[in-house]
Image (tube, rainbow, N blue to C red):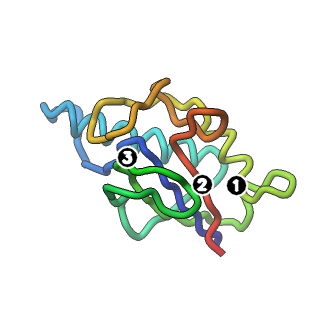
Amino acid sequence: MASYKIITLVDITRSNAHRSDVSSLKLGQQANFNSLVQAIGLRSNIDWRWDPKKYTGALPNDIAGKATHWIWEFETERDYVFQQDDDPVGLLVNDLYGVPVVIDLENSADITPAAFQTKGNNINTWIYIIL
């Protein structure tokens, strides 16, 4: 199994809200999490031990700036399922790019356009393989 880490400025809180829930915040959070899982699942079945965790302050790794962000780790059933050329996450970067999200939840950064942006000038989601 390969492990991956996603860091995003998009609120991907797993709220477990259902259609009958009246909280638009919880519904939006769950919708974003569902969209992320479904997009990843186009190439592989995944599993995770912990739901996404929310952090406030300096962004980790080599990402500059401060903002509310979420970190989530997951595993795939096969190794290197997102490999494209020499990039171990290249296919997932392409798959997530432009997937619509609900904005104005608990995110502190401007998410424009309202989508996961994994490349270009307005990146709001970063993907890493965990070795």
Whichever of callouts 1 and 2 sits on the residue coming sooner in the sequence is 1
Badge 1 element: loop
Q: What element carries label 3?
A: loop
Q: Quick check: 26 above or below 82?
A: above
The residue that label 2 is drawn on is 127
Locate residue 57, reporting x and y percent: 34, 56
CB contact under 8 Å: marks 3 and 1: no
Disc 1 from disc 2: Cα separation: 7 Å
Q: Which residue lies furthest to the front in this view?
A: 65
Q: Quick one: label 3, few (<14), some, or many (20+) residues within 10 Å?
A: many
Nearer to us in this view, 110 or 25? 110
**Which image quadrant is residue 31 in?**
top left
Quarter of the image with the N terminus is bottom right
Label 1 packing within 10 angstroms: few (<14), some (14-19), many (20+):
many
Is residue 120 rendered to the left or right of residue 18?
right
Checking the image for residue 89, the label placed there is: 1
Above or below, 8 relative to 130:
above
Q: In which quarter of the image is residue 30?
A: top left
Q: Position of residue 18 (x, y in %)?
A: 23, 39
**Residue 96 x, y percent position in the rendering:** 59, 39
Are the residues tagged 2 and 3 within 8 Å (C-beta)?
A: no
Disc count in the image? 3
Q: Return the residue found at the far bottom.
A: 131
Q: At label 2, which amino acid type do we have? A: Ile
Query: Which residue sits at x=46%, y=38%?
Result: 35
Circle 2 Cα neighbour tier, 10 Å, few/some/many (<14 / 14–19 / ≥20): many
Q: How far apart are marks 2 and 3 (CA)?
A: 14 Å
| Discs 1, 2 touching: Cβ within 8 Å | yes
- At mark 2, the secondary structure is strand
Instruction: Name which of mark 3 and mark 1 comes first in the sequence.
Output: 3
Which amino acid does the dot numbered 3 rest on? Answer: Ile
Q: Which mark is residue 12?
A: 3
